[in-house]
Amino acid sequence: MSVTYLGMPPFPEAAAAATGDERLRGNLRHATRTIRDKRAAAVAELADWSALRAAGAQIKDRTLRHLDHYLEQLEAAVTAAGGTVHWATDAQEAGEIVTRLVRATGEREVVKVKSMVTQEIGLNEALEQAGISAYETDLAELIVQLGEDRPSHILVPAIHRNRSEIREIFRERMGHWGRPAPDGLTDRPGDLAEAARLHLREKFLRAKVGVSGANFLVAETGTLVVVESEGNGRMCLTLPETLISVAGIEKVVPTWQDLEVFLQLLPRSSTAERMNPYTSTWTGVTPGDGPAAFHLVLLDNGRTDTLADQVGRQALRCIRCSACLNVCPVYERAGGHAYGSPYPGPIGAILTPQLDSMETGLDASLPYASSLCGACYEVCPVAIDIPEVLVHLRERVVQGGTATVRGERTTVRPARGHAAERAAMRAASWTFDHPRALRAGERMAARARRLVPRRLPGPGRAWTDTREVPQVPAESFRDWWRRTRGTAGGAPGSTTAHTVDDGTGAVGSTGRTGPLEDPR
Amino acid sequence: MRVALFVTCVNDALYPRTGQAVVTLLERLGVRVDFPEAQSCCGQPQFNTGYRHATEPLVHRYASAFADYDHIVVPSGSCAAMVRENYPRIGARAAAEGRGGRLAAAADRAVPRTYELTEFLVDVLGVTDVGAYYPHTVTYHPTCHGLRVLGLGRRPRALLEEVKGLELRELASAEECCGFGGTFAVKNPAVSSAMGADKAHHIRSSGAASVCTVDNSCLMHIGGLLSRAGSRVRPVHLAEILASTEESPW
Ligand code: SF4
């Protein structure tokens, strides 16, 4: 089962459709720009931000290096505190475990705290198939759920909606799920929040089972941490009799002291707050206080495979703050849905294909969903070099190589549909490694310069649909230099072992390859 | 001090005036500059599209073409960033793949001597006033790799501020990518053009007659959009502004 939604087209197609949706672009522009500026201000307040950021990255890296150790420590601590730990290899297994646990309580409905990982495993759908209703209680998740929509942002899943759209969804759909929206509902944020509050209160008070994710798992004590803004999480974590938490194995941190770093990095990066309104922590069960039964489902679903990749593994540091989405110019224009998975934006472009082992056409297109501008890396609170990982994954797409797939070291074949590009790239490299051929090519282009049409056919159309092609000059720089300065300036690199063709005719090189041969 | 110009393949083939401007400028500042003809392309398009192996011969070529120079001056933020950021990675990966340390050694030789043009002017020559004269309104777009990978910071602006006659106009959302991104421009043309259209809009709103960057590849995209939209704003590389003087306007 892949992390991407069924039937999603490759990124460029879905993104192209989204760029034409003026309302969507307006909603996204407004929302991301507001958050972007606030985040920058919240971060600027801390003089030691870069040290915090480095510490966050180091704690995560070190924990990931010894993940087996910390996971066992976590399991022992959770068990000792009265919880039960379950291990899930993939999404399907995790869904089955949760379904079985809910069934065992005899209940037919659960309330949910907003969680990325339960979306990743398609938990609501799995529960629905088993006849169990899962109610989202985060305001934005509620909007998405009522609207039978998909989330388009990690933190603000309904970012693609404006308030008048939200009012319509509440008016039309709330009644199907429980308490209907009040008569005469306006689109004032306060009124919309009140309608949601009344609707949800009913659910909180009735539910016997709560389902959550976790932001952090503290190995030394077996403590789970959920960070949220609305208090719905606190309700779901304390009122039900049974609490089932699902978390990716990369969420573990060794000690409480490590939280000091992340509880500063996360709120400032995500909501631009110094501190988030609600931070809930719980350790196993406490008789007479909160849920009497607690289950922790630890999910792999491609994480161990990702961990095996020395460059790609940094994606596992992610604390899902969504800062990278908010600054991403591609996300702002393409919207979250084009990324085809619960993980949109720059982090989605590197995480989804890795969790999926690059199995779908969409997976293979995601690493190209970036201009490599580097804005994401700049804001990432755990310093994930997203452009580096994107390029690394592009390599897996076009060049193949080795990767770990479901625990096995596997030779990966290049993805389909890149043969012409591969030939062109190799030909370009060959030409660039043979300056005489390059010079000849440039002269040919200069002679044909007046023949270049304004609109190119074939793949060139992708450029000329919106942009003029540059005019080819009558003379290349190379020729200008030779004409005005002679060849005297060019000092051939004869002092090193690798002799090169200096374009003067004295070709003497090692290991020459033709343009279509593999240069390795 | 032996100084070489790495003109870059885009400038060589499409924007020779930029290379000529660098030569003119450096010679005016008393620097003798060479153009080793063995140079070609840094390999950025191939590398960034995923063809790391196809990039390797170009790493060797770069290192040997410039082996005899103390300083390699690059009038392109993204090509300088390619050398500085990615050559060491290419070397390390080749070594990790059991193919020895030759690429890593080549990268080691090339990286510390590679300077983007404004770095060379400000850090090595220690000048911001290069005696230029350019009586036009200009807005400056800091291109992503210069801004975020090289960390050029204020260098380009510091140089522009000293140009006589030049009036600098502020650019809204200046630090946002123009949407070029190499092969991104044709792999995701809709998003690339949408980003570029917003950039072009801000450039036109600045009221400047020219838009200036340290990267002609971004300017090719921005300029292509501007002229398709019928705008008269002129794209111009920073080197060409700095080369311009009262006696010989560029
Ligand atoms: S990749 Fe970094 S910036 Fe993006 S969501 Fe994860 S932690 Fe936040």
Image: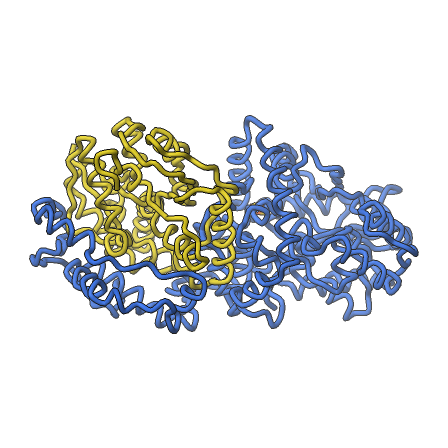
Residue B99: image x %, image y %?
A: 27, 55
Image quadrant where residue A184 sits: bottom right
Residue placed most toward the observer, A407 or A357: A357
Left or right for B5, reference A26:
left
Identity of the residue drawn at 40% across and 34% down? B167
Residue placed most toward the observer, A421 or A454: A454
Does the rendering let one see residue A241? no
Left or right for A411, reference A15:
left
Pick the quarter of the image with the N terminus of chain A. Answer: bottom right
Left or right for B38, reference A190:
left
Identity of the residue drawn at 68% across and 53% down? A159
Residue B227: image x %, image y %?
A: 41, 56
Say which chain is blue. A
Pick the quarter of the image with the C terminus of chain A. Answer: bottom left
Residue B1: image x %, image y %?
A: 16, 32
Say which chain is yellow. B
Does the rendering let one see residue B11? yes
Residue B188: image x %, image y %?
A: 47, 62
Instruction: From this view, report whether residue A216 is shown above or below residue B223.
Output: above
Instruction: From this view, report whether residue A497 is shown above or below residue B186.
Output: above
